[in-house]
Structures are given as C-alpha cells and as structure tokens.
Amino acid sequence: MILRIALISSEKLPVPPVRGGAIQQYIEGILPYLREKHEITVYCISDLSLKNYEIVDGVTYIRLPARSKDEYFNLVTRLLAEFNYDIVHVFNRPRPIKKYWQSAPDSKYIISVHNEMFASKKISKNDAKECIEQVSAIVTISDFIQRGILKKYPQAEGKIRTIYSGVNLQQYQPVWSPAAQEIRKRIKSEYGINNARIILYVSRFSPKKGSHLVLQAMEEVIKENRQTVLLVVGSKWYGTDRVDDYVSYIYSLAKKIQGHIVFTGFVPPADIHKYYACGDIFVCASQWEEPLARVHYEAMAAGLPVITTNRGGNPEVVKGYRNGLVLSDYDSPEQFAAAINFLLKRPELARELGLNGRCLAEARFGYSRVAEDVLKLYEEM
C-alpha cells in the first residue's frame, strides 16, 4: 500500500542540506529509499539557492519563507490542513505537534528526536504529555536521548525506540580504496600537507564541541610527532565563515602550532567526504551531552580510527566495537594528546580500528538500514 507521507524538517536549514545540518542530511539520506515505496513531501525552510516548490526524483519539496520559528510552524499547520497525508513525520520539534494534530487529526504522527527536545527548557510538561499522547511513535537518535525522555515521561514507554542514523556508504569510501587515495593525494597537495600524518577534526567551532581542546592537544602531539598536521574542517555556523570571540580564540591557539594546522572554512555537506579521505585519525571532542554526533558514522565509513568523548550518545557507536578510543577525561587536552600519540605510534592498531569501523558502518550504519527501520515503522502504523 502506497502511503502519502509528509516529512517536516526543522525550521533552521533547508533540504537538501546545501548549508549543512544533521537532520537535513538524515532526511536526504533516507529519501531515495522512502520514495521507492511511498509518496513523499518534504517541508522545510526556504533558501535563496533553492526553489520554494519543486518535484525532484519523485519527491515534492515545499520550502516556506518563514521569518521565525512560529511563523514556520503556522505555515506548516495551514498546509497540513489542505492535504490528506496518511503519516506526518516531524523532525525534532515536539512543541507544534498539537497544532498539526488539530489541523489534520486524521493523519498519524511520528516525532523523531535528535536532541534533548523534551527537556523542561524546551517544552512545557503539558505540551510534552499531549505530544506523547498524540503521536503514534517516538524515534530517538540514540539510547541516551531515549533514556532522557523516559526518565521524565515514562508514559512514552511502548511508543519509543532508537533508530541510529547513518551515512552514504557509496560516498564515504574507506581511506585504503583507490578512489580515496586519489582524493587524498589531491587535497594534501592543495593544502601543501605533503607526507604528514593527518589528525582530522570536522565540527562547528563551539566551546561545547571542544574545538579549543583539540588545538591545545596538538601542541603536545607535535612534540613527539613532528610530521603531523591537524586538518580542521568547519566553521562557526552552517554555511558561513563568520568570526566571533570564540573563533578568534581558536585562531590565536592556531598560531602556537603554525605549520601543523590547516583550516578549510565551511565545506558544503556534498564535499565533506573528500576530507575524510585525507585523515589518519579522527577526533570528536564533544564537551556537552551530545545526542550522538553524525561525524562518528562518517569517520567509521571512511575507515578511520575514532577518538571521542564519553559524553551523551557518542560512546554508543564506539565503546565495545573496537573501532576507536573513548575518553572519560573529556575536558583534558593532555588526554587527547595522549590518545592521538598512542595511535600514531601504533599504526597497525590504528588500521585495525579503522577497518573495524568500516565493517561496522557497512553492517549497521548505512542509510539503507536507517530507511529500512523507518519504513518498517510506517508499515506498523
């Protein structure tokens, strides 16, 4: 049976993810599989580089020129009333579900939760309880997020499940493949990296992402491993290279490791995979209780050993899988340096961890598996 399904993206960034965004990449990743089975409409915010309405590869895109979060919710609400969707799949915004449900009560609703959106500062208790009552299913991006919801709202039991995200396994080729080796050679030449080992860091610049700790750690790394470069892929915010006080601080730290650091600035999501092909070791330095950063899937798919922090959902895809190291002293640059040096001195172990990561990505973290889980959910409703 073909279902009419609306995917309601969050209001900050458009789909496809021309300006980045984990939710937007998730939606884009599963669309090719969903559209084979069902009639799909994607709602998202408008963007100057994209049409407000178009049909591409059988998927309808409705992009809304909203100037605020509430305006976006209101526009979606009005449009849901006009169309008869079987399922409305809302991403990361539980608060407006009451409006959506009142506007289109015959549809069935799913909420996918990618952050701690049921925390008291995000949603009132009454709104949270009504949301849980009105949806047929709650999907969380990690067990960490699921536990947080159940702790506050045990009535969600029975409706809630974790569906881990994933990555495009065809796009992210392992570093030992001929295709990746060719990309590696080209990018290293472009940035003048030559024969240095590359520590890869892909992130927005933010204290909660621990960007400063990685740069501080490199001061110690290069004392023991001179032929090492930190390749920093990212910027302050999606789609822009603006500089604030924290970014200025990052640049001041970079002066201490001059000659051992390269900044790429913002890289469009469609090109990010190329930089993973350059890495030898991948570092995620999350300081906050990260729901589960998608960079872990990307690093695994690229066959890179992962160094991450014991924060939030991050350890769920590393701990026990022999694909990387998990740091409990997550705010210690010395611990990051020690972990990086440990793997640099043990290239065979680093290769083994990377190989294990690629095998794990192929088995559990490709978009085909994510879509399969989502499609199964739709069929159960």
Image (spheres, rainbow, N blue to C red):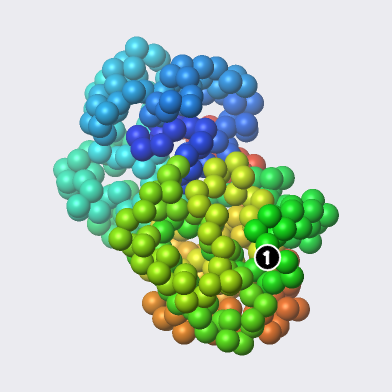
| Residue 54 versus residue 241 in the image, above or below | above
Residue at 62% x, 33% y is 33
Residue at 69% x, 72% y is 196
Side (left or right) of 266 relative to 146: right
Q: Visible in this render: residue 39?
A: no
Side (left or right) of 25 relative to 195: left
Residue at 42% x, 28% y is 47
Q: Residue beneath label 1, please?
A: 193
Q: Nearer the viewer, residue 250 or 14?
A: 250
| Residue 52 versus residue 191 in the image, above or below | above
| Residue 247 versus residue 217 in the image, above or below | above
Side (left or right) of 283 relative to 238: right
Q: Secondary structure at mark 1?
A: loop
| Residue 262 versus residue 60 in the image, above or below | below
Q: Nearer the viewer, residue 33 or 26?
A: 26
Q: Quadrant of the N terminus?
A: top right
Position in image of residue 371 (x %, y %): 58, 39
Residue at 48% x, 57% y is 203
Please state which amino acid type lies under the numbered disc 1.
Answer: Ile
User: Hey, which residue is sitting farthest right in the picture?
Assistant: 178
Quadrant assignment, res 72: top left
Position in image of residue 71 (x %, y %): 24, 27
User: Hey, which residue is sitting farthest top in the picture?
Assistant: 82
Position in image of residue 317 (x %, y %): 55, 63
Quadrant assignment, res 178: bottom right
Position in image of residue 213 (x %, y %): 43, 73
Q: Visible in this render: residue 115?
A: yes
Side (left or right) of 349 relative to 106: right
Q: Nearer the viewer, residue 351 or 116?
A: 351
Dot 1: within a 10 Å radius of its alpha carbon, few (fewer than 14), some, or many (20 or more) residues?
many
User: How many numbered marks are there?
Assistant: 1
